Each structure stands twice: as C-alpha cells, then as structure tokens.
C-alpha cells in the first residue's frame, strides 16, 4: 500500500539515516496527537504524516473485501496490492487532508466505528507492520522537517528521530475529546461507550508483540490532561528547538522551518 507512490520519493528506508529533522509524536488514541502535530507542522513549515491513516485505509479495504482479519499474511498482501495516497485537501469539511484508496476519496470512511473497532486487530499483525514499515521510513528520509504521528514512530519506525514526544491523557479526557470531534461531524456517541472503546484499542495496541504502543526510552512524555492545545503546541515547539540546537542542525538545513519557530 502506497509502495509505488513512496518509491517516487526515491529515498532510502534506512532506519539509521539522518533523521534529525523528524519529529515523532506517539501516544494512545485521541490524545490530541494529530491536532498538536498539525499546529507544530504549520509553525515549522514541516510536512505532516499521520501513519494511522495507513492502518485505517488497509482496514477499510479488508472490511470491504471481506478479508479474514485473522490472516496477517493475506492482509499484508492486500497492503502491497493497493494504493493509499495522502494529498492536500480538496474540500473544507473539517478534514486535514484527503485520503485516497486506489484513487477513491475515503477520508471519512476510514473514521467510521467499523474501522475504529477493527483497526487495532489489523495493525497487530507482524506481516502488516512489516509491509507498512518501509513506506513510512522512505517518507521520513525523503523530506526536510516532518512531523510523524503514530504509536511506534520513536521506538521502531524512526528510532533516531531528532525529537521524540509521547502525548498522553486519561481515557476519560480522551473520550470527551473524541465525543466533541464526532459531534462536530454531526455524530452522537455515548461517553461510556467511547471510553470503553478507547481502552480496548489501547490495550490491543499496548499488548501486541510487534512494536507495541509505548514511549521510547528517550521520548519526552507530555500529559495533556487539563492543558490547552496552545500550551502543548508551544511546549513541543520549545522541545524541537532545543533538540535541533543540541543536534547541531545548521540554520541552512532547516531554512524557513527554523525561522518559523516562535522565539
Ligand atoms: O492514530 P489512529 O487512531 O488513527 O490509529 C489507528 C490505529 O492504527 C491504532 O489503533 C493503532 C494503529 N497504528 C499503529 O499500530 N501504529 C502506528 N504507527 C499508527 C497507528
């Protein structure tokens, strides 16, 4: 999935390449990762890659084709046969970008409760993770500053990312945020059910054998309970600036990106 597209970037998928400009933001579902990542990316002039989209689009494809969700090899085969593209948004309906599956717009279909309920099952298979790993690494290696959002970016996908953040929040707080997000799209959901669903998904993500959800040893953990988005964004930007200074990232390497950082 997305393999052909990513080949076009022409970059290496070496996990030990120079990834000083990669900002890894990991954490459990609905911890605010994408919202924070988008704001940080805008401020830095960086690109944003929400890696959950790859797992979600594969899950949608699997559900549509009645694939056996217990068969990791078959799912990895599906991942290799089909194409996901993440492209600039075509309409202003709350989306951050368009997600295309074999050219069809599936931006909202990948956010349905059917996909929510099954994505962690699909993502737990090692063959699936192995199929999607090089795709993510090539994108990480191919650009300047990039903010990558996921569960295992700092531990597995880009273990030498220059900045590693792990965003956390209580299940109750995350369920409230998810309920608010859904309401904005006209979908009503019960808070208790949302809390249970998030807990179930986190448990599956934490307990899987291959690259489970956990903070990297050198990640900075930020608890976002009771913090505004602006506060978290500012903190992350400060951490990026400190990391780039420490790593000796030259001004010329980041260009506009460094200039955009709030003083
Ligand atoms: O961030 P999200 O809710 O869109 O992610 C959907 C699922 O995809 C999540 O439950 C686990 C999986 N995922 C993963 O295993 N590794 C990633 N890097 C990103 C997502």
Image: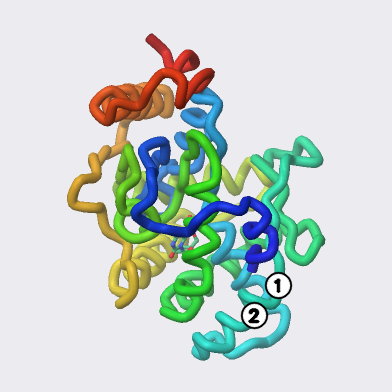
Relative height, residue 202 to residue 69 (above, below): above
Crowd tier of the residue under label 1, counting other residues whose Cα lies within 10 Å: few below 14, some 14–19, many 20 or above: some
| Left or right: residue 156 compared with residue 114 | left
- Picture coordinates of residue 75, whole percent (x, y): 57, 82
Numbered badge on residue 185: none
Quadrant of res 108 = bottom right
Q: Secondary structure at mark 1?
A: loop
From this viewpoint, is residue 227 visible?
yes
Q: Residue at x 37, y 9 (%)?
A: 263
Q: Secondary structure at mark 2?
A: helix
Q: Nearer the viewer, residue 134 or 198?
A: 134
Number of numbered callouts drawn:
2
| Left or right: residue 4 compared with residue 146 | right
> Would you say the beta carbon of the disc 1 residue lies within 8 angstroms of ligand 1?
no
From this viewpoint, is residue 231 visible?
no
Q: Nearer the viewer, residue 23 or 220?
A: 23
**Label 1: which residue?**
82
- Picture coordinates of residue 84, whole percent (x, y): 68, 62
Tell me the quarter of the image containing the N terminus: bottom right
Relative height, residue 112 to residue 188 (above, below): below
Whether label 2 touches label 1, CB < 8 Å: yes
**Label 2: which residue?**
78
């Amino acid at each position: 999935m997305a393999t052909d597209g990513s080949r076009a970037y022409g970059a290496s998928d070496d996990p030990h390449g120079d990834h000083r400009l990669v900002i890894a933001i990991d954490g459990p579902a609905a911890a605010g990762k994408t919202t924070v990542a988008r704001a940080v990316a805008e401020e830095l002039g960086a690109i944003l890659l929400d890696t959950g989209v790859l797992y979600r689009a594969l899950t949608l494809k699997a559900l549509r084709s009645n694939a056996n969700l217990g068969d990791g090899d078959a799912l990895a085969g599906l991942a290799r046969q089909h194409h996901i593209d993440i492209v600039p948004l075509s309409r202003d309906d709350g989306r951050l970008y368009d997600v295309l599956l074999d050219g069809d717009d599936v931006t909202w279909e990948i956010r349905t409760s059917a996909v929510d309920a099954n994505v962690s099952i699909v993502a737990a298979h090692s063959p699936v993770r192995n199929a999607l790993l090089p795709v993510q690494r090539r994108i990480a290696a191919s650009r300047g500053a990039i903010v990558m959002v996921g569960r295992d970016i700092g531990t597995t996908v880009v273990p030498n990312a220059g900045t590693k953040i792990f965003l956390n929040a209580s299940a109750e707080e995350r369920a409230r945020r998810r309920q608010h997000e859904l309401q904005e799209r006209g979908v009503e959901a019960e808070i208790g059910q949302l809390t249970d669903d998030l807990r179930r998904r986190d448990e599956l993500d934490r307990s899987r054998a291959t690259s489970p959800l956990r903070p990297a040893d050198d990640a900075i953990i930020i608890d976002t309970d009771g913090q505004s988005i602006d506060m978290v964004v500012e903190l992350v930007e400060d951490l990026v600036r400190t990391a780039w200074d420490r790593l000796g990232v030259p001004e010329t390497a980041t260009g506009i990106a460094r200039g955009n950082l709030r003083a």
